[in-house]
Image (tube, rainbow, N blue to C red):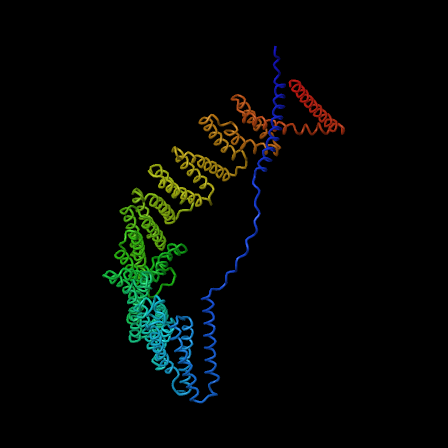
Amino acid sequence: MTQIPSPAEELRLLDAELRQLDARRAVLLTRRAWLVHMLRPTPVRTTAPAPGPRRPEASAPGVQNALLLLGGVLLAVAAIAFTLVGWGHLGITGRSLVLGAVTLAALGAPVPLLRRGLRSTAEALAGIGLVLTVLDAYALYAVALPRTDGVGYAALASAALAAVWAAYGIALGAPVRTADADADADAGERPSPRLPLPAAVVAAQLPLLLWAVAASAGASAVTAALLVTAALDAVLALRLPVRLQPVRAVAAVGAYGMGGWGTFAAGCLSWAAAGPGAAARAAALLLLAASIALTAAWNAPKPGLTTATATGLTTAGGLVGVAAIGGVLRVSLPGEWTVPGHLVCGIALLAVAGTGLPAAVRRGLTLASGCVGALAAAWALPVVAISLLGPVGRVDSVWSGVPANARDAVTNGLPWPQDAVTAPLVLALVAAALVVAVRAAAWRPHALACALTLAWATVLVLPAALELPYAVALSAQGLTTAALLGYAHRTGSPLTARILSLITSVSLAFLALASQSATLTVFAALTALFAAAAPRPGLGPVAAPAALAYATALAVATGARLGLEPWHTALLVLVVPVAAALLAARAEDGPTTVSIEIAGAVAGLLAIGLAVAEPAALATVLALCGVIAAGTAVREDRRPAGYAATALFVLASWVRLASWGVGSPEAYTLPVTAAALLLGAYRRRSDASVSSWTAYAPGLSVTLAPSLLAAWGDGRWQRPLLLGAAALAVTLLGARHRLQAPLVLGGAVLVLDALHELAPYIVQMVDALPRWAPPALAGLLLLALGATYEQRIRDARRVREVLGRMD
């Protein structure tokens, strides 16, 4: 018969076989690695590649241009030095011959160089020739015309140099036959230098300006010279062919520079104008600048003039035109009509933009009109801020008396701008322009929102601006609030209308604090208004809490009007949380429900704050708040409100006990224990998995622990007796229902309470024992523990030996 090995023996055999397989696997892997290494081809060594020739750091054209530039600069410096320093060593004939010969040589040298195709060298020599012509003009002034006016001569010389350089550049660019026409792909056309014509444009910037300065023509003439020069530059930049791009670029820079300088000067003249005549002259200059910009934009698209550039030029031109007309209106009309006059001019741009103009021009005029409208609205913004924030100061002077007019009611000590009487007109015009002008579907909603805000601001500032009666200001803001709520309901509750309605109502509430009758009337009207709007779709989350807030304010104001104490007023305020609890139960959407409950909670906190000075009234208010919270907890989705109700009831009982002078801790802890045990029993009935420690331990500990501490410090027998009886009852109930928490807690308190009662006798017994008794008892205890420990170790060793024999 084959003997079957035991499981332990079979396990030992399997382990031995696995060890042998692991050793064999290691040998095979080593052999495989050696074979792979032997079969790998030997790499062929190659020599490192020879380094190639270094690339030059500068290109040949770059070196050439650098050399030509340095040579031209050095020759120009030498010519200047000769003219300024060495001029006096020659006679008049020698001077003329030397300068004339050198100038003619420098200007004529580019011709043969261009025939040979040496354009860069010709460019350098042409530049030297241009510098020499400037020196010739200076030499002529220094020798022949030393008594001539320097500024006037400079104007004449700059005009002459511009004409000579332009003719020279055109002459150098005239078509001729080259030396090798067959080899030149561009035969018959000479590559002209690029410097003379742009230099001529640069020189042409000076004649008009210098002539105006020389003639002492005044600031207006100098500004006109700048603008005319800019106009000529703009013509050159727009009309010259594309092949003269360098000239066009220089002309464009001159147009922007001289035009900007002239426009700034004309604006300063318009601002400083003290009469219609000076303002009209400045306006003419500004209109000239605007016409230059608009004419340039009209030519879009042109090479070098993009659509964006044309739009920018049109915007600048439109703004300058508005400044021109507005400057005349500023000196012709009263000061408060300056901004409306500019705004009307800006709105007129929209009418012009509606005609058949190029798209870039229409867009630029629209942007210019928008900029004017934005600046006008910003001018009226301080008045809006005063009208909105001024009534807040009424909090410090409630019911101080009916103000004389709406301005006195609004400002409340803040300074009112003198020219703000036209602020409502400005805001209304900007709002109307937005509604009429913006028609694009993408921008229409934003424009309507801005227009609505501006119209609201118009109504807000109108009574104060016109110094209307105080009642008119109240009525205007009240009607505005109602209109905004109606607009929000009709248009699907847009956010802008809802926000503005709330802001207006708050401003109206502060404005009404000046008078008792106004306060009560306004608060009642706002409560009714928002309560009526609350059922409307989309308005509930805003209107419902607003109605509750104003109802709370009405309750406080009513209590103050009746002369009630604050804790009596708190009872009036509690009507609001009751109404909030009832409304929240009937609300159909979540946001409205939450907002109503928040408003009710805030009103409840206010009621508690009003009653905090009177403990008895505070206890009543807390209890009533607990009733409201308990009523809310009846709803299935508001069960957690029960915790708040419990806390409020406990606080109410504590406050009541404190007002009665009760100092026993059980009086404060027993209500908490009762509430906690009721909640625990409810939880165990709802969920069988809840343990007795979770359900009952917190409630029992709240009373048992403070009572035990009080009993240990109490020398009388009544408290320990009652505590022991209560602990015994808890222990028996825990044993009866097999609940661990009552059994353990009640038993522990019962034992500690008994020890408290036996403590005097234990102390007497310890005093009666001899001195050696405590150490002896401690030693016996340690010996017993050591013997027990040794017994457990021996038992563990015996178990291990049994298991070893089983293997």
What is the tally of numbered marks visible in this picture? 0
Q: Is residue 53 left or right of residue 210?
A: right
Q: Residue 703 falls in which quadrant of the image?
A: top right
Closest to the observer, 10 or 380: 10
The spot of residue 85 in percent (x, y) is 48, 84
Quadrant where the C terminus is found in the figure: top right
Any part of residue 630 in sight:
yes
509 shown above or below 99: above
Quadrant where the N terminus is found in the figure: top right
Q: Residue furthest left?
A: 356
The spot of residue 755 in percent (x, y) is 63, 28
Q: Residue furthest top?
A: 1
Q: Tell me the residue at 56%/41% (across/down).
A: 41
143 shown above or below 321: below
The spot of residue 312 in percent (x, y) is 33, 63
Q: Residue 748 falls in which quadrant of the image?
A: top right
463 shown above or below 273: above
The spot of residue 238 in percent (x, y) is 31, 68
Closest to the observer, 700 or 146: 146
Closest to the observer, 61 or 135: 61
Q: Is residue 726 left or right of residue 789?
A: left
Q: Residue 406 falls in which quadrant of the image?
A: bottom left
Any part of residue 466 in sight:
no
Q: Tell me the residue at 47%/74% (across/down).
A: 71
Q: Is residue 716 left or right of residue 693?
A: right
Closest to the observer, 628 or 313: 313
